[in-house]
Image: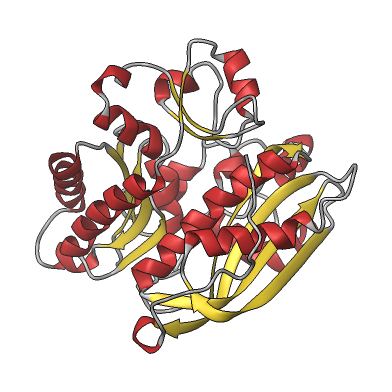
Amino acid sequence: MRHIIHADLDAFYAAVEQLDNPDLRGKPVMVGGSPQSRGVVATASYEARVFGVHSAMPMATAVRQCPQGIIVRPRFDRYREMSRLVMDIFHQLTDLVEPLSLDEAYLDVTGKVAEGRLPLGVAIELKRQVKDATGLNVSVGVGTSKSVAKIASDLEKPDGLVLVAPGEEREFLSPLPVGKLWGVGPKTAERLYADGIHTIGDLAQQPDEWFARRFGKRAPYVLAKAMGQDEEPVKTERTPKSISAETTFPEDISDPEELGDVLNRLALNVSSHLERKEVKGRTVTVKLRLTDFTTLTRQTTLSTATNSEKVISETGWKLMSAELTPGRSLRLLGVGMSGFAEHSDLPQQLPLPFSDSMSQG
């Protein structure tokens, strides 16, 4: 039996800003771009979230909803530094760590439990170590699978700890909103609500024929998740074929400056993953999903491999901006890198792929 932890730092960027600047503690902090330049919210503190502020929201909207909010420009180097400290703590606990972004990861702690430690005790100790070393709170979910652990970690934020005991997965999932399930996005959730299916338990009770009609080839996958069955392993630091990050917007975005801010944040995530895996790539890809759900994928191959956030961002901007025709809006934006090589095989000086400068607001 496996024992999986999903660890997620609470309001990470905002929490770092409040940690470094005591004057911000207990106040609504909105990390992101300027409302005058159509910036977006990267992360909001929990004090700001009570006013409905959330990540990817236009900063102008956030200011209207929370006029007393304090806007802080992102300091990505600092966030990356703190992320490394936290990931080092994870790796001290287990070699089986799968980072998902700067602020969250899966940990397979089956080995620790086999040594006689209780899963709850492992989770409590992990939270304590992160707090002692960094001053940051991390919410933790513990379960027998990745999907259950991830759902659990989100239920009692901030500073949460939820353990789902072996054999209780289906009982745990049953009363939760169906939109919390892996494989059920916002649009799918809306269609399920229209069918009278509101909870994961409602979904799990549907017959196989219904699943086949509703989800097609994905039916077995979704049904298994709804029943708490998930054998997907924690994927360690081996090099994948590609590394990417994407986000779906609460509202479609057409403004290039807003999209540029989001692109920068995604490029940071990709760059950080590349650095942790000690690889560089040559092929940059952007993924654009339009309002009508048409998905466009554009890519280019650089002359020199890189893991530079700046290079990834500028290359992605060139690819994306070519598709931003008047009247076109995006509901999803993604950035990826492939064509990997090991650090030791690469030169240290990296030319930028484009000589002209770029402004993204």
Whether residue 186 can be seen here: no
The quadrant of the rendering that contains the C terminus is top right
Instruction: Count all numbered tags in the image, as a single digit.
Output: 0
Where is 29 relative to 78, above or below? above
The location of residue 303, given as percent across then percent down, is 59, 82
Say which quarter of the image contains residue 134: top left
Question: Left of 359 or right of it: where is 161?
Answer: left
For image coordinates 19% across by 56% down, the residue present is 89
Q: Position of residue 353 (x, y in %)?
A: 61, 71
Where does residue 81 sit, x and y in percent of width and height?
29, 51
Q: Is residue 245 above or below residue 78?
A: below
In percent of the image, x 47 and y 65: which residue is there?
Answer: 308
Which residue: 38% across, 51% down?
104
Q: Quadrant of residue 224?
A: bottom right
Position of residue 58 relative to residue 355, above or below, is: above
Quarter the N terminus occupies: bottom left
The residue depicted at 20 percent of the width and 53 percent of the height is 119
Q: Is residue 321 visible?
A: yes
Spot the residue most to the left. Answer: 116
